[in-house]
Amino acid sequence: MGRAFDLILIAVIVTSVATVMLNSVHSLRLQYGELFMTAEIIITAIFTVEYALRLICAPNRWAYATSFFGIVDLLSVLPTYIGMISADAHYLMIVRILRLMRIFRILKLARFLREAENLKRALQLSLPKITVFAAAIVAIVVIVGALMYVVEGEEHGFSNIPISIYWAIVTLTTVGYGDMSPKTPLGQFLSCIVMMLGYAIIAVPTGIVSVQLHQANNAVTSCKKCGEKSHDRDSVFCRMCGYNMVAPVTPSLAPEVEQVAVATNSGRRSTDNPAQQVRVPDKLELETELSLFTRRFTDKT
């Protein structure tokens, strides 16, 4: 039931975002404007009911209402109602694009989002090094901008240092709009150096993050039985086969672990799944968006 709810919600979210995007095309709005408006009203009604039910069902309503996705849920329905009151508020309907962010909440347990957690961790660990590198880049563009202002001067379009810094940034990032270009031999030589340095902008941060990402991926627990790797660092049981991935337990805990192993194997005891020690998680099944919602906003007081 929870999975079906997730899939239906994803379809409604994608349809809503597609409606907003298509409605922004003038020719389509003239031809299908009424259809878009009807779809918008239906979708808004669905999300209004969903938001109300979430408020009613949440054990801690205030925690949900003030959470990030609670605010997103509210913003996803407000623009339509505001647009009905005031025609000038039409462009607030773009706020409904925020609905798309809710897809990531629903798909949070998917494998690629577990990899996204590793990427997030790698970026956090790389932040000090990237900050130092970014500071060095800022220093380079300021120095190059000042040099180009002196070398080229106003007659070649480098009328001031900020404009020259703009050129340095465009050249360093290998964008090259072509609106400004050096004319003197010395200026052209400097531009060649800047263009070659531009490759370092991509290579250095990529290398820093890649090392941290590799370490983060290696830190994730893998199952020795089925090979599944999409586990958290503190995972005890495999999310696919229920295999216990830690050390053997004491005899007093063996019955509890055995019961869990049988439960994860559809009632069939696995002969190659030895009793092992650590905490037994409350839920072994893959949680749906509904179960995550209930667990997250439970009033712990």
Image (tube, rainbow, N blue to C red):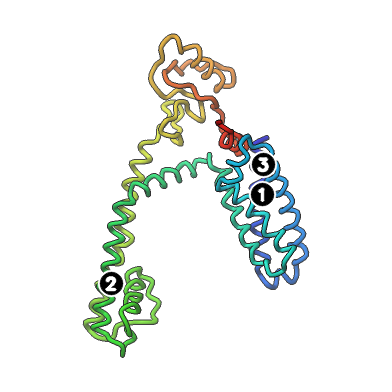
Q: Which residue occupies the foreground of this view, 136 or 208?
A: 136
Residue at the spot of label 1 = 11
Instruction: Using a 10 Å C-alpha cutoff, classify the residue at mark 2 as few (fewer than 14 neighbours), some (14 to 19) or many (20 or more).
Output: some
Query: Which corner quadrant of the image does residue 86 belong to?
Result: bottom right
Query: Which corner quadrant of the image does residue 229 belong to?
Result: top left
Dot 2: element: helix
Residue at the spot of label 2 = 142
| 3D distance between C-alphas at marks 2 and 1 | 49 Å
Residue at the spot of label 3 = 55
- Which kind of residue does numbered mark 3 sit on? Leu
Which quarter of the rendering shows the C terminus? top right
* Residue at the extreme left: 186
| 3D distance between C-alphas at marks 1 and 3 | 22 Å
Foreground mark, 2 or 1, reads 2
Residue, x 71% and y 49% (percent of image)? Answer: 48
Residue, x 31% and y 47% (percent of image)? Answer: 211
* Residue at the extreme front: 301
Q: Which residue occupies the foreground of this view, 132 or 223?
A: 132
Q: x, y (%) of residue 191?
A: 27, 76
Dot 1: element: helix
Which quarter of the rendering shows the N terminus? top right
